Image (cartoon, grey):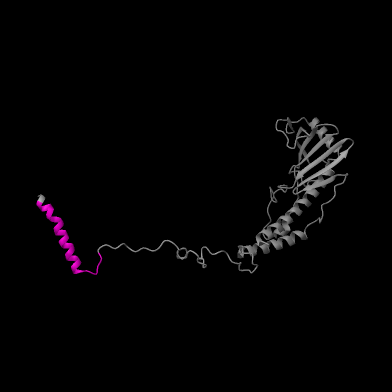
Amino acid sequence: MLPLLRCVPRVLCTAVAGIRAAAPSLPLLQPASRPCARPFGLLSVRAGSVQLPGLLRPWGPCGCGCGCGGLHTEGDKAFVQFLNDEIKEEKKIQKYKSLPKMSGGWELEVNGTEAKLVQKVAGERVTVTFNINNSIPPAYDGEEGPSEGQKVEEQEPELTSTPNFVVEVVKDGSNKALVLDCHFPEDEIGQEEEDQSDIFSIKEVSFQSTGDSDWKDTNYTLSTDSLDWGLYDHLMDFLADRGVDNTFADELVELSTALEHQEYITFLEDLKGFVKSQ
């Protein structure tokens, strides 16, 4: 058996030699060709070469000819045109070119979307603060949409900003502030009651330290949801005696609406400039 196995390699070598002699031009083993997986542009990089491949070449000026080298698409052009038209329309319907004045001697301080009304009365400092962000209720909240065949422009209501506002009352020489968190109930906005009911409500009442920039959650806060009506009426009278009444609330809504519209137009202009990249 062993002699037979020993002669096998010799037989195979003889067979291979015969094949090579019969077909000398055919290689026995050649690796299969496959496409190159690396981009040809990267393969052309040479040390010291001035010519950069396409993938590494820096962006040139955009197609519009502005020379900024930024990205400009047809969608951006349509977006800018839309913003131009929107800004023109908003400026047409803008009711106030400057913010309206508050009656009663209130001094107005505006910091972006936050507004502060300050008044000093007989040894007290009354401050009313509000922010216009998210102050416009949904256009069709609980109402029917535009009827079929009717233009949307004719159906759109006038947008009104009804922000929550905070009243702080500080007496001279005191380190405590009586803070009343107020809001406009949605079912009261735009309604004219014969009994002249209050168009705003008090949500919470608390004392806060005048030296703290942020209110502390550890201070007791009184919710008016379960408050005795007698105490609630006295709190409303307390505000009215300091100029925070229905007339004040109406003027605050008008001021807030004008400020919100002004900031909205500014936002559209900033957005147009950002998309346009100029």
Residue 13 appears in the picture as rendered: yes
Task: Please say whether residue 72 is one of the residues in the magenta stretch.
Answer: no
Residue 208: x and y, percent?
Answer: 76, 33
Query: Residue 19 lies in what quarter of the image?
Result: bottom left
Residue 6: x and y, percent?
Answer: 12, 53
Residue 197 appears in the picture as rendered: no
Task: Tell whether 62 sits left or right of 50.
Answer: right
Q: Residue at x 73, y 54 (%)?
A: 264
Q: Main secondary structure of the magenta part?
A: helix
Q: Residue at x 78, y 52 (%)?
A: 258
Outermost residue on the right side: it is 122
- Image quarter where the C terminus lies is bottom right
Q: Nearer the viewer, residue 127 or 256?
A: 127
Residue range highlighted in magenta: 3-27
Task: Tell whether 33 sits left or right of 77.
Answer: left
Q: Nearer the viewer, residue 196 or 46?
A: 46
Query: Residue 12 lies in what quarter of the image?
Result: bottom left
Q: Residue at x 10, y 50 (%)?
A: 2
